[in-house]
Amino acid sequence: MKSIEARSAAVTAVSFDGEPSAADLEAIEQELPLILAEVDLLDAQIMVLDRPVTELDTRRIRRARHRVLTARRDAANRASVAQAGGAA
């Protein structure tokens, strides 16, 4: 049996402790509103998989889609402000 070795020192230079870095946690926190909105949309869609769609279900899905679009817009705006602010 052959042993597997890293051919590059860069592969093993950084130790991984299994915990996310502060930058990773900040990125997750910035994306959290979008993640939660997408989960709400998915929940609304799952509810109607095995039964006929009612008017209430239609409204619930429409509102959830709107929240996703709003969260995406806000995330894009935050990203563009961050890039513009970093370049100035």
Image (tube, rainbow, N blue to C red):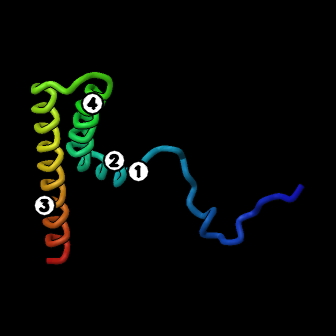
Q: Residue furthest top?
A: 51
Quarter occupied by residue 29? top left
Left or right: residue 69 compared with residue 1:
left
Please state which of residues 85 and 28 is positioned toward the viewer in this rendering: 28
Q: On the image, numbered disc 2 is attached to which residue?
A: 25
Q: Is the C-beta separation of discs 1 and 2 under 8 Å?
A: yes
Q: Amino acid at mark 2?
A: Leu
Tell which tag, 4 or 2, sits nearer the viewer: 4
Residue 43: assigned label: 4
User: For the residues marked 4 and 3, what is the alpha-carbon distance in whole angstroms?
Assistant: 26 Å
Residue 77: assigned label: 3
Left or right: residue 5 compared with residue 57:
right
Please state which of residues 85 and 36 is positioned toward the viewer in this rendering: 36
Quarter occupied by residue 47? top left
Q: Is residue 34 above or below residue 43?
A: below
Q: Amino acid at mark 3?
A: Asn
Please state which of residues 74 and 49 is positioned toward the viewer in this rendering: 49
Are there few (<14), some (14-19), or many (20+) residues within 10 Å of tag 2?
A: few
Residue 81: assigned label: none
**Can you say which quadrant of the picture contains the N terminus?**
bottom right
Q: Earlier along the polypeptide chain: callout 3 or callout 2?
A: 2
Please state which of residues 63 and 81 is positioned toward the viewer in this rendering: 63
